[in-house]
């Protein structure tokens, strides 16, 4: 674990591109602002763009709790997290295999048995992870030319076709995160970040999700109301 600063509350943040800070500088992320201000908080950002709730559960198990936090905040993104929980591949490119959990009865089972990437795909992934030059070059190429095929909105629509299962799976993943945190004496909080339509009215699936967590006693912050 990272050595603690005396008397400060340690917060670990999980999430996707919203918490990661896509398209803003490191100094503009909300975790940095929490960490930099004189508020008694030190914050650690473990969010990764494109991750879904299943991957965030794995991050909590393998990394987040090792940091010995006082509080874990899950930044749940209504725009895509429900679909990300279900899909075995990345929502936006439709190709990158992702570990996911399946719900069998009331049990969460990890399914990471997808086909391994080809050597060429693995090399591109490595460059994307470690090379600024590669990423700057890729940004100059229209993404539609790189990623032909089914549009991500069609993948999302298919992933959400069984809303009852999507809801049960999403709630089960958050319950597991809450249980893991509570076992360590860590406070767990869900911050629900809106998509565009959620500013006007809570969508049916999102509303049921928030209500289910509330019945379980899991603290939920509606960021649409805060914004």
Image: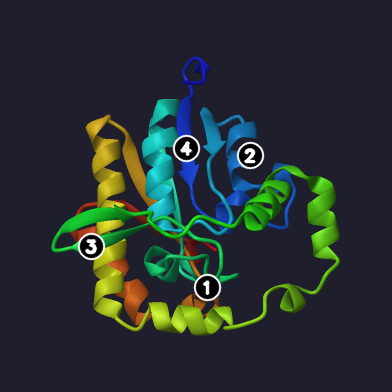
Say which residue appears at 26% left-offset and 48% top-offset: 176
Say which residue appears at 30% left-offset and 68% top-offset: 209
Say which residue appears at 55% left-offset and 77% top-offset: 196
Q: Do tag 4 and tag 2 residues touch (Cβ < 8 Å)?
A: no
Q: Quadrant of residue 222?
A: bottom left
Q: Which residue is mark 2?
A: 32
Is 94 situated left or right of 9 in this image? right
Q: Is residue 164 above or below residue 130?
A: below
**Camera-side mark, 2 or 3:** 3
Is 187 situated left or right of 24 in this image? left
Distance of label 2 from label 1 (alpha carbons): 23 Å
Say which residue appears at 68% left-offset and 50% top-offset: 123
Distance of label 2 from label 3 (alpha carbons): 35 Å
Q: Earlier in the sequence, mark 4 or mark 1?
A: 4
Residue nearest the observer in this picture, 137 or 64: 137
In the image, residue 115 lies at what x, y percent? 46, 59
Q: Residue furthest left?
A: 105
Q: Which residue is mark 3?
A: 103
Q: Which residue is mark 4?
A: 12
């Amino acid at each position: 674990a990272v050595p603690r600063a005396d008397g400060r509350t340690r917060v670990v943040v999980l999430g996707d591109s919203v918490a990661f800070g896509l398209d803003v500088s490191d100094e503009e992320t909300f975790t940095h602002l929490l960490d930099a201000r004189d508020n008694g908080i030190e914050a650690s950002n473990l969010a990764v763009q494109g991750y879904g709730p299943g991957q965030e559960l794995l991050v909590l198990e393998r990394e987040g709790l090792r940091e010995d936090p006082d509080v874990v905040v899950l930044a749940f993104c209504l725009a895509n997290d429900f679909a990300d929980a279900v899909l075995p591949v990345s929502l936006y490119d439709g190709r990158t295999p992702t570990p996911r959990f399946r719900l069998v009865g009331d049990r969460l089972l990890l399914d990471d048995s997808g086909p391994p990437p080809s050597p060429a795909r693995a090399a591109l992934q490595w460059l994307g992870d470690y090379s600024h030059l590669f990423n700057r070059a890729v940004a100059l190429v229209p993404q539609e030319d790189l990623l032909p095929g089914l549009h991500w909105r069609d993948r999302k629509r298919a992933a959400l076709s069984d809303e009852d299962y999507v809801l049960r799976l999403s709630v089960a993943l958050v319950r597991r995160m809450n249980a893991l945190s509570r076992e360590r004496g860590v406070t767990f909080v869900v911050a629900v970040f809106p998509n565009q339509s959620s500013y006007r009215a809570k969508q049916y699936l999102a509303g049921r999700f928030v209500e289910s967590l509330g019945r379980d006693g899991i603290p939920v912050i509606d960021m649409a109301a805060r914004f």
